[in-house]
Structures are given as C-alpha cells and as structure tokens.
Image (tube, coloured by chain):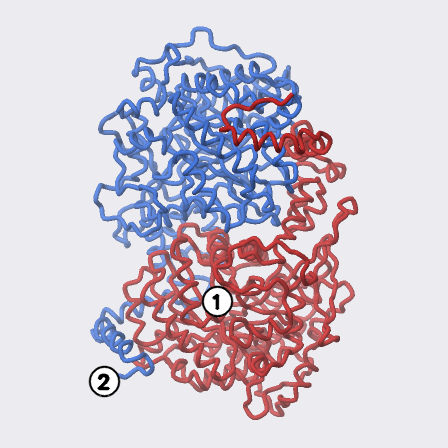
Chain colours: A blue, B red
Amino acid sequence: MNIQTPIANAIPTGERPGSRKVYQPGVLWPDIRVPFREVAVHPSANEPPVTIYDPSGPYTDPTAKIDIEQGLSRTREPWVVSRGDVEIVENPREVKPEDNGHAKGEHLAPQFTAPRRVYRAKGGAAVTQLEYARRGIVTPEMEYVAIRENLRRQANDGAIRDGEDFGASIPDFVTPEFVRDEIARGRAIIPANINHTELEPMAIGRNFLVKINANIGNSAVLSTVADEVDKMVWAIRWGADTVMDLSTGRNIHNIRDWVIRNSPVPIGTVPIYQALEKVNGIAEDLNWEVFRDTLIEQAEQGVDYFTIHAGVRLPYIPLTAKRVTGIVSRGGSIMAKWCLAHHRENFLYEHFEEICEIMRAYDVSFSLGDGLRPGSIADANDAAQFAELETLGELTKVAWKHGVQVMIEGPGHVPMHKIKHNVEKQLEVCGEAPFYTLGPLVTDVAPGYDHIVSAIGAAMIGWFGTAMLCYVTPKEHLGLPDREDVKQGVIAYKIAAHAADLAKGHPTARAWDDALSRARFEFRWEDQFNLGFDPETAREYHDESLPKEAFKTAHFCSMCGPKFCSMKISQEIRDTAAKQNDVATGMAEMAGKFRDGGGEIYVKTE
Amino acid sequence: MNIQTPIANAIPTGERPGSRKVYQPGVLWPDIRVPFREVAVHPSANEPPVTIYDPSGPYTDPTAKIDIEQGLSRTREPWVVSRGDVEIVENPREVKPEDNGHAKGEHLAPQFTAPRRVYRAKGGAAVTQLEYARRGIVTPEMEYVAIRENLRRQANDGAIRDGEDFGASIPDFVTPEFVRDEIARGRAIIPANINHTELEPMAIGRNFLVKINANIGNSAVLSTVADEVDKMVWAIRWGADTVMDLSTGRNIHNIRDWVIRNSPVPIGTVPIYQALEKVNGIAEDLNWEVFRDTLIEQAEQGVDYFTIHAGVRLPYIPLTAKRVTGIVSRGGSIMAKWCLAHHRENFLYEHFEEICEIMRAYDVSFSLGDGLRPGSIADANDAAQFAELETLGELTKVAWKHGVQVMIEGPGHVPMHKIKHNVEKQLEVCGEAPFYTLGPLVTDVAPGYDHIVSAIGAAMIGWFGTAMLCYVTPKEHLGLPDREDVKQGVIAYKIAAHAADLAKGHPTARAWDDALSRARFEFRWEDQFNLGFDPETAREYHDESLPKEAFKTAHFCSMCGPKFCSMKISQEIRDTAAKQNDVATGMAEMAGKFRDGGGEIYVKTE
C-alpha cells in the first residue's frame, strides 16, 4: 500500500514559467472561482498581461495544497447537492475482484481510501446540464464556462473577428445565458458527472474554443498507478482539456479512482474495455448485465463521459470486410465480434434507452463511439463509416429525448480533401451535436510522427467545426506513450486547436498571437518564451545558440547575427517612416500614383 | 588545410533501413540512370516492392565511391557540352578575399581544389531548360524528370486518382514530352545550372510531386565547413529535394564550393547576403556592381537558383510601417534599407533585365523573393505583401521573355482561412509559375514547435497548388538548426508534401499509403518501419514497449496487448465473412433491406 509516496513525488506542480495563476469570481454564483494563466510582459511593452485558458487545475497554483491521497477539493459538491434533485446512494456498488481483473496481493493497486459520498438522481430523473438548460436554469457550471471562455475580456472590447467559421455562431462575448442556450440546443456539452465534484467545468461545442483530449491508460503489458496519475496531471499541465482513461489491464477500477479523485478535468472512459476484462477478454461472453454493472460502477466513481459503440450495428459489419484496415477501433471490433458470434444486433444499440436512463441519473455524457472509423487513407469516408454515422445521428435524438448530453466521435485516417465532408455530414446527421475527432491523420506513411500527421488534419477539422480534438502521440501505431510523448501530443494539439480558433475568427484568439509577435519584433525574448506553449523548450533552443544572459536582451538573434538582422532593419524603417513625412505619407501617395500610372516606372518626386 | 578528414568522416552514407538503391535508364537518352529507393516487403505479403522518390544521391548507394575532396561524379557535363551552345570560360572569375569575408589563415576555410571546367553560354544565349523546351527539345534533364516522377509505374496501371486538385493538370503518367511542355509553359522549372554537373535533375511544378527545400548555412555566430556539407547530405538523406545555402558569415565562397561539388540536388542561394558581406554589412553601400559580381561568382560556381528580392519596391515600403512585425525577410529588409537610405528604386528591380541576361547564360533559375512576406498572423495577406506579389508577376514575364526559368516565393505566417487566397492570387498574377512557400505558419504562439505549426500550413498550401515547400525547423525564431533539427524539419515537410500529393490525387501517392496500411493490418512490423519516413525511429518506439525480437512478428502490439487487439478481431471478422455466405453476401443484402425498411429495427433472417 506504499504506492502513495512515489505518486505524490512524481506529480508536477508549481506555476508555469512567467505565468501567474489568477481567478475570476462569478456574478450569478459569486462563490465560483474560474482559473486563468496570466502572462505578464516586460514593462517596456506597456501592454496588459495576456490571459490564457488554463485547464491545469490546482497543480499550477502555488497556494494550493496538493494531497494525492485526499484528492482535490470537492468544490462542486455543494452545487450538486443544492439543486435538491440528488440523493446519497446508501449502498454504493462495492468493488468486486473482477473490477480489478482479479489482481491480488502485491499485484493489486492500492484503493483510494479517502471517504466520499456517492450521489445519484432521485427517482431516476435527469440531473443533467442539458435538462437544467432546457428548463431555463443557468447552473454554476454554465456561468463558470461563460467566464472561462471569455479569458477575462470585457464585452464589446473590439476584438478582431477576422475568420471564416463555416456557419458557426460564435458570439462576440459569452454570457451565461448563451452557454445555457447552446447546452439546451445540444450544440455544446458540459461533461460533469455529479460524482466528479473535483471538476472545473468546461464546455465542448463548436461555438466555444476548440478543446483537446489526451488519452492515458495502462494495458496488459505496461504501466502502473503512479504513471497514470502523473500522466493525467502532466497532460493538463501542458493544456489537455479532458483526459480519457483507456486502461485495459488489471487494476482498472483502482487506477481510475486515483485519476478521477485528482482530476480537475472531465474524465472519459470506454466502459466496454472494462466489461471485456470482467469476462476474461472473451468478446462473445459480453452481455448486457455485465455492461450495465460496469456503467453503474463507473458512473458512481464519477466518470464524466462514456464512449459507447452503439452504432456498430450488425448489418454494417460486412461493409468492413473489404477494407484495407478493417475495424481499427478497439471498442468497435469487440462489438463487431460479439455481433458476428451471436449473429445478433449489437446489445448496446438494443439497450440504448436503458443506457440513457443510467447516464442521466449521474449526468454522464455520451461520446458516441465511431467503432467503424477508417484506420487508413484507403478506408476514409466509406460506406461503413457513414452508415454508422447515420445511426449515431439516430441515437443522438434518443439520448436528447432522455435529457442526456451527447457528443459524436469521428475519424481517424482521412486525406485532406475528404475532411470537410466529415464535418458537414456530422453536423447535418447529428443535429449539430459536438463533434469529437481523433486527428484525423492525413497520411499513413509516417509512423513515429503521427502527432504531426494528425495535427494537420486536426487543425483543419477544428476549423471546419469540430469541437474537440483527441490527441495522437508520436507513439501512435507503435507503442504506449510515455511522459514525453504525452507532452508532444498535447502541444501538437494545442497548436491545432489554436490554429482552428484563429481561422474561425474566435474573438479571443488573435490577441495572443499579436502579443507574441510584438514581443518577437521587439526582441523581448523572455516574453516570447513565456507566451509560447512551451517556454522551457523555447528558452533552451535559444540558449543553445546564444547562451549568455546578455543575449536574452540582445536586439538580434542567432539566425542572422548582430549586423544582419531583419527585425532591426525593420525597426529602422519604422523609425525613418515616423521621421520622414515623405515616407510616411508622401510615399504612400506616390505608391498610389505609381500604381495608377501603370506601375512600369517609378517616377521620383524630388 | 586538414579539414577534409573530419568532413569525410561526418558524411552519412549507406542505404536506408530495408531499402535498396535502384536505377532506371532512359529511353530517349539511354545513358541516364534515374535513382529510386526500393522497399521490398515481406514475402508473405505477395506484393511488389514499393518505389519511393529518392533525392539522397550517391550517398545511399553502397556501390558508390564517395570522395568529398573530389566531389560527386559530373554526370551532366557531357549533356551540357553536347548541346554545343556553351563555351569554357577561359578566365573564370578568381576568388577574391572579400568573397570569404576577408577570412585569413586558420580562419579561412580550405578551398575545394579538385579541378573543373567553368561553362557559360556562347554569345550570351539562353542555355536554359525553358529555352530548349520552347524549341521543342526534350533534354536528358527532362526525360530524367519524367522517369523520376513516375516512380517506376507503368502507363495505364490503373492508379487511384481520388483527390481534389483545384484545377491542376496532373497527368496519369508523365512523359518526357509532358515535362517539356510544362517547362515551356513556365508551369514548372528544372533548376540546373550548367556548372552544377553533379546534379540529379528534378522538377518543381504544380503538376509534379510536391517538393521540399531545406535551408543550411553558417552565420556570423556559428557553424563550419564540415557542418554545412554534413547538413546538406543529412537533409537529402531524409528527403530534401533542394537545399538553400543561406550562409552569411565568413568563408561563404569556400563553403559553397564544397556544398555544390558534393550536392546531387539543386542548390539555391540569396546572393544579396554575400553582396552585403562584401560591403562590410552596410546595406547603404550595396550597388549594382558588387551584386553583379556576386551573381557571376555564384553562377560560375554552379548555384541552381537565386532568390532575388526585386519586388521590394520603394513605394511599397511605407506599407510595412504599421505592420506588427515589419519586414521579416532578411533580403527584403536589406533592400528596403537601401531604398530608403538612397530614396531610390530598388536596384534589383531597375537592373532586372541585366540580371536575366546573366542568369540565362548559366541556366540559373529565379526564385523571386517575397521580401515583404508577413512575419505574423496580423500581417498576413496585407497590402505590402500583395503589392510585391503583383510586381513579382510583372518580373516573371520579363524573365520569361529572356528565357529564364522562374519560381515565386510565398509566405510566411498565414492563418488557415487566408492560405488559399495566396495560391489563387499567385497563380493568377504570376501566370502559373511555380509557387515556393515558407510554411506558412498558421499561428505565432508556438516557438520551439514551428516545424509542426508550419507543416499544417504547408500541407494545405501544397494541396492548393504550391510546388515546393521550404521547411521550417523547431529552432525557427530561436536559433540555428543543428543536425537533429534539420531532420525534424525535413520529416515534417515530407509529411506535408505527401499529404498534399494524396489530397491532389497524384497517381503515385496512394499506393505508398496503402502498402504501409496493409503492412500495419497484417502486423508486418518490419515492413511498417521500413515504409515510413524514419524506420529507425519507428523501430525504436516499438522496441521501447516490446523489445524482444519475437514481438516484431507478433500479431499484436503494446497498445492493446495480445488478448485485446482490434486488428486481430478485424482479421477474424474478415475470415468469418469469407466463410459465411450469409455474412459476406446475405448480410450485405440484409443491410440493404434494413436500410430500405426505415432502419429502425433489425429483423433476423433465420
């Protein structure tokens, strides 16, 4: 049971370089404290600090007391309880040996032991953000999200709205009422299980900032409790907005407990993975009862969203037989095997309404799994993929009927020219429910670099309207990601998400780029490092060439050297332009005359 | 003078893992030998080997004798001489002290001493591929390119043409006549200085495979001869199609000699950099004579293309004064400073026809520099950028008039929604001359990761019609790239270029992806490694999780472990489908009936 100390030691804490953790309170709900990362720039710039979206939780708050054995503070518990529609589960489901793959003795990961109450809806009601939104209630979660998305901007601050949003409805300023309305329409979700009260609420929707997900998880082959908790904290430190625990080996239950209790971001899972473990890995032995039991187990733990592969229907399976890479989704292939073995319809599809009834009692959101997503360029946008998507559209409406929040998973491997169609079809078929895609990878030929391959597709699909991008690490197709891979994957996806926000014309996006570019132009090296996604690496790269401290204030860089600097020359041009009337105004006029005159020869005015 | 040994030792030679160097002869010109990299797959696949475009030169040919002091074999010399339109320059320009920045003694890099002849056109004629093409001559260079672009495909082999090419004219099969026609129209170039006879010819054009350029070069601060030659060989080993030598410090001349004499790919330079060194770094002291002298110096050395910033016209400079990042092109800022200091039109613009006369006598191609490209998202697609582009269009026509080959440089920093307009405008304004862009970077906020940021923009702009993508390394904006950075930059850009080829529907593109995906599906691990851009890294990543040799033939991977493998399950589905008629055909019918029946409930047939 002495695994706690190594876990605690491994957890990365403290502020990011050049950053300060700040909070903004609510107005409707004055007790909420929405966190941001504030990066102050050098006083010489005479500019306000830049506020950056911050999913890293209390780990980057130097005043927070981090105690992994206690878990994070349960800030949301009063919000949940005060709504008056939940009850304490007097006899929560007990942990069974099969929940941890029958691990015993030294092979059994320690339980998370700090006591907590387990909640569920009274009388099977829907206690979901969707249900509240429909009733016109602005929850604390909704106001939290509104404040968070504005990044401390004021309404009507004249932000630049230069972009192409393909029919999205991104507001100039996010009000709590706007959040409520988006949730009520099903165009956004706030994944927030009533049993995950450690959560800092966030929204996933096309009219909000593009989010990213990082996957963690042990497998039969690798990993331990300490690694997974550390990876979760590490992933959010670099900017992951949600984390999926894809564990498949032993100790799934106990590891998940540690992860959720210490996670400020929504945790997603694929319950069929654990259900399969409970039937000793034999897909044919899966059944509704073991799956239902697993849903309740995980809902009581506080999982915020479930990937459910209910769209892998029996009649679609033959559509995959001639694919180059068949079915590459683990969940999809498990369900396909079950369907074929029994020659019966997918039991997740048949029991979908019962699944909804369970999920709405805890506010677990659906992530409707794309079990038939393409695993290669050859299989992109094929009949199997789109048949499943039609079914996901049908199931979206069923979930909404039950008041359950829904997002839709998407591919996969898709060449650039086929990406846009995925978004258009998803929006149409699924009634604008948020799209959540894995990449997509735009070629198959770069094993070892699939974070880059997929960041290309992710940036594009995010621009077109995808709400959340599931990261891919350099180890994709080759092995399980380690800490460095997680970081590389998260940063590649932060880039993709921000590039998408910029191209959509999101009103908070441009200010950040402009602040960094001004720092670059003015050789404020420290500001340039600190405003980037990875200040430590930027500084290290700079110092490799120019190690001395003086070079951090030098008005040149190693690319050109002191004599030969384009930024320096540019500054001289600007200074000259400011001094010379004929340059600043006369020359501009002259340029006009020149162009009017046919542009062949420049005639001097003196 | 003992620098040769360390150089020779550093040069990376030998075949790439799992690859074999093969050659295909010409038909019109039987002596030409076009190199390819052939990757054989495991016999169990029962598939032909995959042929990959190979710019790595003799360094990856185990039978080639590499002697850095002699340089590569001058294969093209008979081709050049036999055309009968060139003469030996009896008194080639002698190396002057200022050519090497007055470096002396131990600071002077050794000269490349192996003797060679220097050629130029007889009587100032155009000895360019463009001129030959217009005359209807299919040169060996053109047939070489045709063979190279087909990657050993046969005509009418039924390659998949699934893509969106935005009006490009990519043929099913590249004939020498097609190459000639593209060159004659100015839609493609073959950069091939008559004094770079070590060259393996390649084409840059929208209707050919997308190419990538890697930059090398010392600066006043860093680097040596050995580093630069090694970086060139290293860059082409990973797939760079051309290399620009952007040296700015001392020893520019001597380093360039070593690089060109050992380079099988076109070498580009920015002559104004060296001209500036010759006037001690004082932009105001630049003049036509020193520039002209530099052009001849470099043309006689064998530089294949010159970046010439003739579009930075005096009237455009005020348009940059209010930019966030001013002028970020080094060449652009030098010329802007000169223009402002003298309040005169850019002397490169005024002497443009004389520049053409020099370049056509050696077949140096223009890379018309975008000195006013945007250096930040804020400045993208602005008046300064597009004013210069209009002038580049005007200059393109002048160059064509003189029979000089031309490509056009493009940005820079551009958000995704503004990328396409760049290509459309360039194609229109510059009469479809090949576009050659730096990235573009789709956000400014990721210093340390700009290879990824810019690979996103590069893939998109390549898809839209850009012919060559200039790489960006992780050190962009921070420092000078080292060997590892060069590799990372090249691979990111190989990904972008191939993704663009795929999306354009280039007939050679899909076969590669499909071969790798089949290997992936069939757990042919070695094939998956070898078919990727970086077999060594893919293998290393795999082995971190599953080190034993047995796992390289294992039908599972570390992501799911042996019991839980989606590929394995997929294979079972395929096997089942093959066995069961009702699955393979009956179920497909059933699926049709099901959908026809409204898709609500699946009715079993038994």
Compared to residue B362, the image places residue B187 above or below, namely above
Q: Give x and y (percent) for residue A241.
A: 42, 35
Nearer the observer, B525 or B205? B205
Residue denoted by label 1: B435
Rendered residue at 68%/78% (across/down) = B76
Q: Is residue B451 left or right of residue B158?
A: left
Can residue A299 be seen by looking at this rendering? yes
Compared to residue B231, the image places residue B543 above or below, namely above
Residue B87: quadrant of the picture:
bottom right
Q: Give x and y (percent) for residue B176.
A: 64, 72
Judged from this view, the residue extending furthest toward the top is A90
Compared to residue B165, the image places residue B407 above or below, namely below
| Local SS, label 1 | strand
The verdict on a common chain for dots 1 and 2 is no
| Local SS, label 2 | loop
Q: In front: mark 1 or mark 2?
A: 1
Residue neighbourhood size for the residue with mark 2, other residues' Cα within 10 Å, grouped as few (<14), some (14–19), many (≥20): few
Residue B324: quadrant of the picture:
bottom left
Q: Give x and y (percent) for residue B399.
A: 47, 80
Rendered residue at 33%/45% (across/down) = A506
